[in-house]
């Protein structure tokens, strides 16, 4: 599916996956309204383009400025960063040198991140099993982790006849070093993600990063499907 981050998260949320609150915006005014509605004092302004690597990306119009994902702490900053992104061209590792024009942004509540982890589900064509791929190296591309530190990747295959069970989900959670209530929160997220994968007939669902918050919650901070 060629959908944006905020659309993928909205789909996952329907299946019980925990995601931060947020609103899409097509203008500076909508961005300000979104932040006001969310409340709080930390927001993240996120460029919505069909490519990853936005955080580390650069805008053609301001190559020395910030990237495509910015944490902000005032309404004024919501406005100036929305203005800087809307209509500008974001170049990331995945867009190629031409970049992609940002026509919409997502205003999300800021999340207190303790750990960033990697989680994906994909269809293994050889075994026709859904495979869960997880890693403690959240925020990094999985290809890079596979090449440099393959021991940090956990893989769990799921038999399509029996589907996912608590056993599979706990194996992933323990493989990521989760403890206490983080385990049950991660199991809930994995179960919801699997249901979304099956019911939406996806071939890939990637949550990078899945984060553990300071309070011990487990949240899908970025999603692709
Ligand atoms: P991309 O993968 O395209 O760079 P992400 O959505 O993964 O975009 O965001 C990049 C980074 O920005 C994340 O790894 C995380 O550190 C930070 N980030 C994203 N969303 C939030 C949020 N709601 N609160 C705090 N930090 C965030
Ligand atoms: Mg990401």
Image: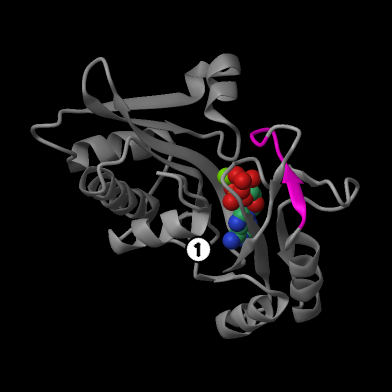
Which residue range is magenta in the image? 88-95
Q: Nearer the viewer, residue 83 or 212?
A: 83
* Quarter of the image where one finds residue 51: top right
Residue at numbered disc 1: 215
SS category of the residue bearing label 1: loop
Q: Residue at x 40, y 62 (%)?
A: 10
91 drawn magenta: yes
* Magenta part, dominant SS: loop
Query: Can the viewer see residue 221?
Result: no
**Horizontal side, residue 152 vs residue 195: left or right:** right
In the image, taking residue 117 as reference, residue 18 lies left or right, namely: left
Residue 166, by quadrant, is: top left
User: On the rendering, which quadrant does ligand 2 occupy?
Assistant: top right
Q: Nearer the viewer, residue 83 or 177?
A: 83
The answer to if 52 sits in the magenta stretch is: no
Where is residue 208 shown, x and y percent of the image?
52, 43
Number of other residues with Cα within 10 Å of mark 1, as a class: few under 14, some 14 to 19, many 20 or more: few
Furthest residue toward left:
161
């Amino acid at each position: 599916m060629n959908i944006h981050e905020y659309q993928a998260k909205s789909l996952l949320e329907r299946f019980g996956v925990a995601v931060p609150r947020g609103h899409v915006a097509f203008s500076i005014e909508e961005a300000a309204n979104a932040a006001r509605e969310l409340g709080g004092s930390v927001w993240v302004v996120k460029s919505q383009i069909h490519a990853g690597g936005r955080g580390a990306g650069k805008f053609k119009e301001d190559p020395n400025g910030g990237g495509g994902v910015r944490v902000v702490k005032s309404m004024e900053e919501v406005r100036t960063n929305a203005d800087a992104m809307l209509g500008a061209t974001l170049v990331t590792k995945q867009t190629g040198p031409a970049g992609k024009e940002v026509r919409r942004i997502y205003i999300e509540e800021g999340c207190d991140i303790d750990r960033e982890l990697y989680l994906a589900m994909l269809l293994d064509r050889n075994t026709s099993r859904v495979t869960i791929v997880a890693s403690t190296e959240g925020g990094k591309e999985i290809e890079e982790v596979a090449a440099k530190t393959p021991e940090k990747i956990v893989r769990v295959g799921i038999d399509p006849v029996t589907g996912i069970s608590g056993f599979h989900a706990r194996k992933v959670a323990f493989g990521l070093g989760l403890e206490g209530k983080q385990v049950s929160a991660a199991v809930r997220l994995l179960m919801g993600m699997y249901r979304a994968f099956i019911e939406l007939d996806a071939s890939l669902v990637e949550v990078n990063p899945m984060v553990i918050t300071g309070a011990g919650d487990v949240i899908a901070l970025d999603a692709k499907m």
